[in-house]
Amino acid sequence: MSEGISQPDRPQVREGDAPDLFSKFDDLIAMREGLLASGQEDPFNLVMEKVLSPTRAICNGRDTILLGTYNYMGMTFDPDVVAAGKQALADFGSGTTGSRVLNGTYQGHRECEDALREFYAMDHAMVFSTGYQANLGIISTIAGKGDYIVLDIDSHASIWDGCAMGKAEVVPFRHNDLDAMEKRLRRIPEDAGKLVVLEGVYSMLGDVAPLKEMVAIAKKYGAMVLVDEAHSMGFIGENGRGVCEEQGVIEDVDFIIGTFSKSVGTVGGFCVSNHPKFEIMRLVCRPYVFTASLPPSVVATAATSIRKLMHGGNKRAHLWENSRRLHAGLKDLGFELGTDEPQSAIVAVIMPDLAKGAAMWEALLKEGLYVNLARPPATPANMTLLRCSLCAEHSAEEVGTILGMFERAGKAVGII
């Protein structure tokens, strides 16, 4: 403060008078402390001391099967992918230290976008630093104040945050409900800008959206369509392009969002589109303009992985075998699952409550199996889930071992 400039008198605040900005988290703090007080391992703070392969790691000094990593196609240790990253690190250094619109576009960023355009057979591709930022940026930029966004109530947090950032009117509908979606669209003024946001695979239960019918309804009411294929890229569809390809609507969708942190096996996000004006997004999309670009080693691994996924038919087939076997085996053991039939690489096991779910998670970890413990509010209908994410690198023997671990843990905890 400059001398000689008077300041208005400030009220004296005594200790305890000021509001505690952390008080909003008290219930969550109490829940976490309650879990840990009984000696429970913290399910949200696991440390992998050494990663051995796409399917195994050392956790708490124990060789552990990984069944909760989203490494669907097992590309993290692919020799060509690793070699590409090492070469780019040597050639271009550790980072760009800049935004894509300034000094942050290297040769590798363009090559990664070329790989995406080839993979999806689309005109435009835009790489973001994370998948979260891809949704945040695209949604908030194309749908703003005065526009309407119609979205599934179970949409990912990044989709909701993109809606909030853009200040569009948000109109949610019941999960995968075609009638509810159409009713919402029917009420929106005909001349308003409309964006329908859907997901190919929903990450909590692993269920698939009826995109064929939903896209037809959206187009009937003049809406643009964005589909998040984060959990389906790489293994669903003949060429691994996702549910849009599987259901024959990829040409009718305006934007496809995806991530590199699932099937691609690294980090980053992207959007592909055939819209003729799409390239202007590079100048108007704030989460793209005002974020440092991905390191050269990361885009090199992504580009190499994407090009290999184009020829990943055998891996896709094996992943589906794993999914069907695990789903059927858990069902036969008496576990309640999130879907009646396997629809993706995600198999969600429904727990009676958080306490039982945490106990089951710990029992599995002690068996040598890591899964995700998912809890409200991230889960639909306030469910507690053990979310299993299969990998194309899981062997048939490993899937059999996993089923034995679930049986022993389930009986020990009293769930089956």
Image: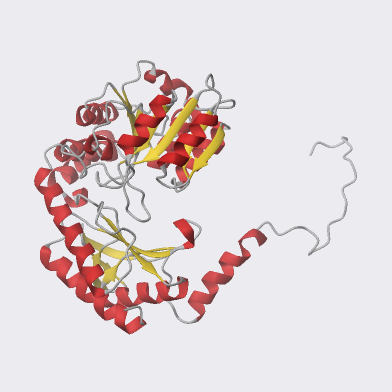
Q: Quadrant of the N terminus?
A: top right
Q: Position of residue 385 (x, y in %)?
A: 39, 64
Residue extending farthest left: 314
Q: Can residue 388 be seen?
A: yes
Q: Can residue 95 be seen?
A: no
Q: Position of residue 140 (x, y in %)?
A: 50, 31
Q: Quadrant of residue 327?
A: bottom left
Residue beneath the point at 30% across and 71% down: 335
Residue beneath the point at 34% across and 60% down: 338
Q: Position of residue 175 (x, y in %)?
A: 43, 47
Q: Is residue 4 left or right of residue 393?
A: right
Q: Quadrant of residue 342?
A: bottom left
Question: Where is 283 relative to 358, above or below?
Answer: above
Question: Where is 414 relative to 383, above or below?
Answer: below
Q: Quadrant of the C terminus?
A: bottom left
Q: Position of residue 223 (x, y in %)?
A: 44, 26
Which one is nearer the viewer's eye here, 352 or 270? Answer: 352
Residue beneath the point at 45% across and 81% down: 39
Q: How is the image coloured?
A: secondary structure
Residue beneath the point at 27% across and 70% down: 369
Which one is nearer the viewer's eye here, 116 or 339? Answer: 339
Residue extending farthest top: 276
> How many numbered tags mark residues here?
0
Which one is nearer the viewer's eye here, 124 or 48? Answer: 124
Q: Is residue 192 left or right of residue 244?
A: right
